[in-house]
Image: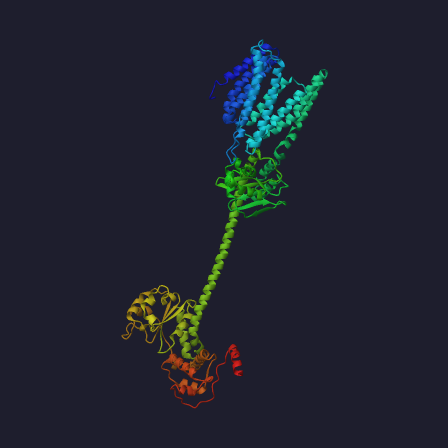
Amino acid sequence: MSAFPRSWLLPSATVAYVAFASWSATTGSLRWGALLVLPVAVALLWQRTDRLRRTALLPTAIPAVQGVGWGMALHLAARAGPAGRPAFDAAANLGAGVCTIAALIALASVTAPTGLITGHRAARSRDAAAFAAVLWGIAVALPGTRALWPGATLLDPLAIDYATMAAAIGSTLLLAASAGRMVLLRGLELGVGDRARGALTLSLTGALIAAAATLVDVAPPDRVLPTVLTGTALAVTWTCATRDPASVSMALRASLAIVLLGVPTALFTLWLARRAPDALGLVVLGGCAASLVAGLVARGVARPLGPESSRWLTAVHAAMDKALLPEPEAALRATLLELRRAEPMAEGRPELWRRDPAGVLHVDVAGYLHEASAEFPERILELALNEPERTLRAETLALLQVRQPELRPLLGWFESHRAATATALVDGDGPMGLLVMPRGARSAALSLEEARGLRALGDRATGLLSVSSAMARSRQRELAARHHAEHVESERAALAEALQAEERRRTAEAESSAEPLRSTAHGPASRMTIQEIEQLARAETRLVLVAPPGTDGRAWAAVFHLASPRRGEPFVSVDCASLRARSLENWEDPHNSPLKRSAGGTLVLEDPAALPADTQEGIAPLLLQHTGAIVVCSQRPLDLDDPEARLSKNLLRLLRGPHVTLPALADRAEDLQSLVLFELAAAGLRTRGEPLGIAPAALRILTEHTWPGNELELRALLRHAAARTAGPLVGVDDLLSMGLHATEPPGTPLPPPELPRRQRARRAPRSRL
């Protein structure tokens, strides 16, 4: 029910009063129509507008619609009366004036959706309505005065006609001017521009119809012009009051086609009927035929009247159909290809900007879909979400860039991409991207119908973009995983190379320690001992080497390490008689202790009995945590029951393992020659840069020596001899001078060992000198 159930009584009663007066003053069927139809129409209009407040009409335009309806009904009711009556002229002019003023107020009261553009203050001015009120006040006052005081005025009846015509012409121009001002000041506001352009078109069309009707002399100008004006005011008010501005553009194209074709046909038919009353039937038949033809061609005539020849709407609707293709990539390609037809000659192109992962999709001239990485314009998306139909336009930014300088970079983005609009794409999870349309040769402002089409297309393309985003993220994850795998593989290879290098370095240290033994061990005693050690190395992590005094236990321990599964791990040998080894702090160092350096490898303890008792007790729990093998070089077997053992019980328990007794040098007669030559070659290279040899007689002296100091004694003797001898061979005299005794006469000198080719090359120049 209406909020004001009796508000229609007064306007309906006034119309009924004028209609009854017309019915009383005239004869014919027209008076009955005015009396029976117009008051009821006003009452229905009053009630219907209240009901349509929430559906089809804007609440701010309800008074204007009611005013136009009442004014038009009053004007028609008065014109149903006899001509030349001042009272009826005053009532008719009052109705026309109310229609005009209501239409002008409706133009000034048009509201727009919220966005960057808030509307110009001058476009909301009601100065045109005030001026129209002055014009129609005069046009009503003149016949009203004559009607109230017919004998008291000397007013010429033509003055009333002139005043009516002047008010009608002025009001028509005011409607056109107000609509034009609205186009200039508010034409970029979505919805408002459609209403303003529709009002301007209807105003100009009404003016043309009024002029044509006057020229063909359909009726007197003082009756034709106000009547056409009321119809124009009604049409203008409808453009401002309808809730859906897009319906203005759609209805205007069809109505304009009918008006442009039908009105001239009707006017020409009326003019011809008045000029040839004898052929009235033939004229009417011809007019009907012409009207039929006009209706048939109206649709074709209406098509060019759309915005920019409807290229955008046609392209958008076609793209919406293509977006329904089942295959996402094909649908995207077909959609963008159809949108390209909106501006086929544009330098820019339709683009779909994806937010996550950031990228842009477009089609080339040949119709191939391309995808490229690009920085997503977050600020443009933010503004587009707050714009009507979620569409941000370059023309909006251009209009506001002076007052809002922060928008200039965004306008630069539009210009660099030659874009006209950017429509936000949103799904249930939030914003996903942008649909960007190129500017091309377009000069007209974007209509609301086009903006809604872009939004509808964006809603439909959101699903495609969602699939594209998911596929792009999948490809991105795949590429990231591949790059990560390649990076991990490169790191693994680098680490493996580093580990191999470290393993080679560690192995080289152990091989360097084992080289004197492996190069000289040819006799059965040494070979059997090496074989026994290598067998134990495969399964044992503890080994006790019982070494005679002076025996190089480190070399035998290196053989154990190289034969074990830990050959690539650290090999650390500790002389327990050294000052550093005797300090417990050295063993407790968390970074550089022997235990830390030999973790996972082999730790060699040479003569652990030389350690102080407190150090032995301190390293016992540390050795318990050692993760590698431990080799002990001791002059005595490790026996818990040995009363002369100088090791603590705890340390003995930890170090016990298989025992291997190393052969003394006196038991390795087969190895002595190789060992002597190896040591002399090394000593010669260190002191002279070339290896030394030994005379056979001198070698026999060394062979017959008992060597109680084993390798240590031999190595010291040979180094001393290498330092004393002046020639390339160590002779008997050199040995005798050091206290050794010869038992047989010297024989043929033993030649020095064959040198490697590189060393022979180094020696050759020296021999020539």
> In the picture shown, does residue 28 fall above or below 545?
above
Q: Position of residue 295 (x, y in %)?
A: 65, 26
- Front residue of 454 and 444: 444
Residue positioned 51% across, 54% down in the render:
482
Rendered image quadrant of residue 552: bottom left
> In the picture shown, does residue 335 fall above or below 61?
below
- Front residue of 560 and 79: 79
| Residue reaching furthest to the left | 643
Rendered image quadrant of residue 33: top right
Residue 236 placement, left or right of 681: right
| Colour scheme of the picture | rainbow
- How many marks the image carries: the answer is 0
> In the picture shown, does residue 220 fall above or below 484?
above
| Residue reaching furthest to the bottom | 745
Rendered image quadrant of residue 717: bottom left
Q: Position of residue 597 (x, y in %)?
A: 38, 66
- Front residue of 735 and 116: 116
Residue 418, visible in the rendered structure: yes
- Front residue of 692 and 625: 692
Q: Position of residue 613 (x, y in %)?
A: 28, 70
Residue 667, visible in the rendered structure: no
Q: Position of residue 51 (x, y in %)?
A: 50, 23
